[in-house]
Amino acid sequence: ESSLSMAYFRSGDVAQAIAGFEKGIERGEEILKRDPQNRSVRASLAGVHQNLGQVLLEQQRYAEAARHFEKSLSAAGQGSAGDVSGQMSASLARIGLGRIARDQNRLEEAEAHFSAAVRTLEKLIPGSRDHRVLLNLAIAYSRMGDVSRLRGKPVAALNFYTRALPITDELIAVDSRNAVAMSARAECLSRIA
């Protein structure tokens, strides 16, 4: 259901996307009531909350988005340390919470969330060259650069942007149609210029 809901969102049907995510959350919570130790459902639920938070964030519905990002963190936090999917959901939720804090000029809080996402993603790199991990790490570095720039720390900002660039270059070399990597690269370059 999460994939279908994201398809609705990408096609512009936000209401249908939100309804689909909410239905998926309801089903996941029903299963967890019967089987609270079901790690697969817990990881899926973390992902659905994270995706719904992202949709709400894009709609600037910050309070609702933050609530779903927090629920994603909670569900992901109850998984095992080797649960890459749960750790990815947690890092994406942190990036979402950081964006909300940044947009509301709570820069220290934004930095804390982005830093937590970076730490989580950097731990995943040695065991995996998963392109999703790399892409999200590049985005987290870029967001850390934005916060550093806004806090008047241009050297730190430059450091984060230049850490993101080789990752985006690697992703574009693998898939020259990777629009998200190209956008992240362009964003970093525009900030450096």
Image: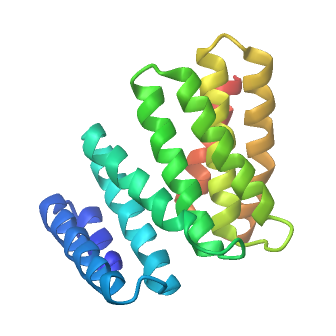
What residue is at 32 percent from the left and 89 percent from the top?
A: 34
Q: Is residue 187 visible?
A: no
Q: Residue 153: x, y in percent?
A: 72, 14
Q: Is residue 19 left or right of residue 93?
A: left
Q: Nearer the viewer, residue 160 or 38?
A: 38
Q: Residue 151: x, y in percent?
A: 62, 14
Answer with the quarter of the image where residue 83 lies.
bottom right
Q: Residue 31: x, y in percent?
A: 32, 87
What residue is at 33 percent from the left and 48 percent from the top?
A: 67
Above or below, 192 relative to 11: above
Q: Quadrant of the C terminus?
A: top right
What residue is at 74 percent from the left and 15 percent from the top?
A: 154
Q: Residue 123: x, y in percent?
A: 79, 60
Q: Nearer the viewer, residue 138 or 83?
A: 83
Answer with the quarter of the image where residue 61 lies.
top left
Above or below, 5 relative to 106: below
What residue is at 79 percent from the left and 36 percent from the top?
A: 162
Q: Is residue 9 visible?
A: yes
